[in-house]
Amino acid sequence: MKRIVLLVFFILILVSFSGCYDYREINDTAMVAGISIDAGKDAAYEVSVEVIQPADSETSTPKAKVLKESGNSVEDCLKRLVNAATKELQFSHCKLILFSEAVAIQGISDLVDYFLRDPEYRSDLFLAVVSGAQASEMLSTGEKESRISSYDYAAVIENSYTETGSVVPTRLYQFPMDGELSILPVFKKNNDQFSVSGSEGFRHGKKYAEFDLKFTQSVLLVSGEYKQGELLLFTDDGVEVPCQIKGVKTKKKIVGEDPLTVSVTVDCDILLTTLPVGFDISTEESMNETESEIARLLTKKLQEDWKTAYEENYSDIFGLEIYVYRHAPKKYENLNGKKADFKVQCDVELANFGISNERIYE
Amino acid sequence: MKGKTQENDLIQKEQPPFPDFKINSKGDLSQNAFLSSDLSENRAMLQRVFAGDGTFICRDFSTEKPGLASCFAVYFDGLIKNEIVFESVIRPIIEADIPVTSAEILSRRVILNVDTEIISTAKECFDAMMMGDSVIFLDGCSQAVVASTKGFPVRTPQEPTGEKALLGPREGFTESVMMNVAMIHRKLKTVDFHAEPMTFGTRTQCRAFLCYLGSIVQPELLKEVKRRLAKIDMDGVLDANYIVEQISDQPRSLFRTVGLTERPDVVAGGLLEGRIALVLDGTPVVLEMPYIFAETFQVAEDYYQNFWFASIGRLLRVICYFLSITVPGIFVSLVSYHQELLPTDLALSVAQARVGVPFPLGVECFLMIVIFEVLREASQRLPDSIAQALSIVGAIVIGDAAVSARFIGSTTLIIVAFSGITGLISPRLENSVIVLRFWLLFCGSVLGLYGVLFGFLGIVLYLMSMKSFGVPYLSYCFSPHVQDQKDILIRAPWWVMRNRPAFFSMDVTRRKG
C-alpha cells in the first residue's frame, strides 16, 4: 500500500513538472524564420513574419510564405498574425529580426526588450536594419525565389563577420538596454537584391550614425573581435595596400591619467595579396621596413576612424569609455564628461604567402 | 538434488521377492531393495521395472570355461557405446582365464574399464543405468558391477554462437556436463579447483557440478550459493534457466543477476576472480555467480586483443546501450514537446518527413519498434535462407513502401533503426533493452524530456537497489577507487590490473604470478 501511495505521489509530481498540455505535433506548427518590423501607415507598426512551409515530398525544398499584420504594438501585430495563420506559429527557430530605417530612428529598445522577455525567442537571433526599403520587402525576396530569406541573410551576417570582418553580428541578447552604444548591420537594396552596406550606430536604442564597411572593420579590430578579412590601407601617396588580416590579438590598457588615455595594441598577421608599389620584401631588412610601414598605416587608419567616431560624433562606438567604466570605475567618474584620449599601437607581422616564399627569405 | 536415501525403507535381502518399486509423486522410487543373489530374480525384477521401456537391454552371456558363473549385463540402448560394452565388458568376461565367482574379482581383474563400481541395491543399479553405465550381474552374487560405458551422442565442442570472438579460443560448451567440466579443468590446472557434484530434478536427475577455486572464493558466498541451490525442489531441470529463476535475487527483474556463458575461458576467468560456476548436464550454458551489471558490457575478446581496442569497443557498447534505450524517447519528446531544442535544419526535415503521416509521433515510434522486434524475433528463429528473405521483405516493406505510402516518417524510421541496431551490440542486455526502450518511449511521449529523465532515474534507482548474491549489482560502476575502474568502462592493460574484485574474492591481490 505504501508503495502504491508513493508511486501515485511520484506520478503526480511528475505530471505537475510537465504534461501532455505541452504536446504539439511538429507538422501542426509553422516555423517562423524571421520577423520584420516597419512603421505602419495607419497603425504604429507593421509586422511581417516569414513562415516556412515544409516541402510536400522528400526531394523538394521547403518554401517560405510571408504573413503581414499591422497594429499599435508589436505584440498586437503578432497576436493578429497568430490568429490569421492556419497553423500554430512557432518562433523558436526565428533567426533574424529586421527593423526598417524609420523604426530604427524611432527607437528599438522597447521592441528588443519585448523579444528578450519572451522565452519562445532565441536570444541569439540576429538584429539588422533595412535601409532604403521596407523591411518586409527583404523577407519577401525568399517567397519569390523559393528560398528562406531570413536564414540566408542571417548566414550573410555571420559570414561577413567571420570571413571579411566587415559586419558586427549583434545578437538579441547583445543589444544594450542601458544606454550603451551598439552597432547593427544595415542591408540596402541594390537591383532587387539586398546586401550588407555598412553599419548603424545606436545610442539609447535609437539610430544616430551610419558607418561604412571599412569603419566597421576598425571597430572590430579595436574591440578584439576581428576574425579575419580584407582591409584596404592607403599610403601617404594614396597607393592602395590590400591586406589580408588574420590572427588578431588586441590588448587594452589605461596608461595616462590626465588626459585619461587608453592604449590599444593590435597585434596581427598580415598577408599582402599583391605587393604595392614602393614596398620591398626581398631581404629581411626590407621586410622589417615593410612591416613597420604597414603597422604605421594601420595605426593611422584606426586613429582616424576613432577620431571620426569619438570626437566628431561623440560616439564611443570603439568601446573605450566602456572599457574604462568596467575596469577603472573611479577613473571613469573622474572623467566627468571630459573626453578620454586614445593611443593605438599596431604590431604587424607579415605572414608567409606561399608562392613568393623564396623571395621573402632570400 | 540426489534423492533422499531410503535406507530406512530397505527391504532385507532375506525378504524376496522384490517390491513393486512404485513411483512416488516426485518421480522417485518409493522403495529400495538389496539385490538378490539369484540371477533370475534380479533379471525378473529389472524386466518388470523396465517393462515399458523399449530401450532396456538385458544381455545374457556365459562360457564353457570352468569357474565362470552365468551372468548378464543390463543397459539402455543409445545411452551406451556398443564398442565399449563389447570390448571392456563382454569380451573380457567371456575370455576370462580365472574363475569369476564374485563381483570383486569381476570388477578388479576381469572388466577392462576405467571406472567400475560395486553396487548392492536396486536403486544404485537404476541410477547407474540411467547415466549410461552398464550393470553386470553374476549368478550367486548379491552385488553387481557398474562399468562406465557411456556413449550417448554428444555434440563436439564448437564455437559458441551467442558469444563469437575473432580472437581467443573458439571452443564452446556442449550438452555434456563432464566434457564441460573437463574444458574448465583443462584451463585451471590447480589442486585448488573444486567441482562438487550435484543433481537437480527428481525425474530428470540432471547432473551438475559446482565449480570454484577454494582459496579464492569467499566462504559466505559459497555458503549462500549452496543454500539457494539446496532449496530447489522440482521434478525436471532441463536447462540452466530452470535454476537461474530459482536462485536469482530478483527473479522478476529484467536484468540478470546470474551470469550465463557458453565459453569455458569466460568461466575460467570468472573462477579466477572468485566467482562460482554451476555446470549443468544437457545445456551448453554455464551459470556464473555473482553477476554484476558491468559484466554485461564485457566480452571475452576484450581480454584477447590490445587494451586500446578493447576499451574503445567496451565504451562503444556502453554508449550504444544507453542510446538504444533512450533515443526513441528523447526523439519523441524533442519533436513533440521541445521543438526549440532541435537544430533548425533537423526540425525542418522532421516536419517535412511527417507531412501526411496519420499517427502521432509517439504511436508511430511504438508501431515501428514493434515491427522491428517482430522482424528480429522472426529472423532469429527461422532458418538462415528464410531469414534472409524476411530481412529483404522487411527492408523493402518498411524501409521504402511504408515511407512512400506516408504510413510512417523517414526520420522515425531512421531513429528506430538506429535504436534497434545499437540494441543488438550488447546481446546480454537484449531483453532488457526492448522493455526499457518502450518504457522511456512512453515516458517521453507522455511527459516530454522530464519524463525521459525521470524514467531513466527510475531505472538507475532500480539497478542500485539490486543485488546478486549479496553483491551490489552496480558494484564498481560508481566506485571512486581507480583500481576498481580498470575493468569496467575500459579494459586496462594486464600489468595495471593487479587486484581481483574485492566483492567476490578472499585474496584480492593477484595477477603477479
Image (cartoon, rainbow, N blue to C red):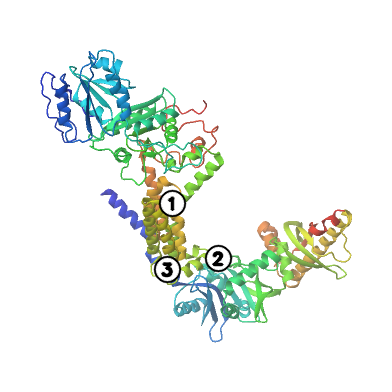
Q: Are marks 3 and 2 on the same chain?
A: yes
Q: Are marks 3 and 1 on the same chain?
A: no
Do tag 2 and tag 1 residues touch (Cβ < 8 Å)?
Answer: no
Q: Is residue B37 left or right of residue A134?
A: left
Which residue in the protein does label 3 denote?
A25
Residue B378 at least partly seen: yes
Q: Is residue A87 above or below residue B100?
A: below
Residue A250 image-quadrant placement: bottom right
List x then y, in percent, for residue B26. Answer: 19, 35
Q: Residues within 10 Å of mark 1 (few under 14, many from 20)?
A: many
Which amino acid, by three-letter code, is at mark 2?
Answer: Ser
Q: Chain of mark 1?
A: B
Identified at 71% across, 62% down, the residue is A228
Residue at mark 2 to residue at mark 1: CA–CA distance: 38 Å
List x then y, in percent, for residue A337. Answer: 71, 67
Q: Quadrant of the N terminus of chain B?
A: top left
Residue at mark 3 to residue at mark 1: CA–CA distance: 27 Å
Which residue in the protein does label 1 denote?
B423
Label ID, residue A123:
2
Q: Is residue A134 above or below residue B383?
A: below
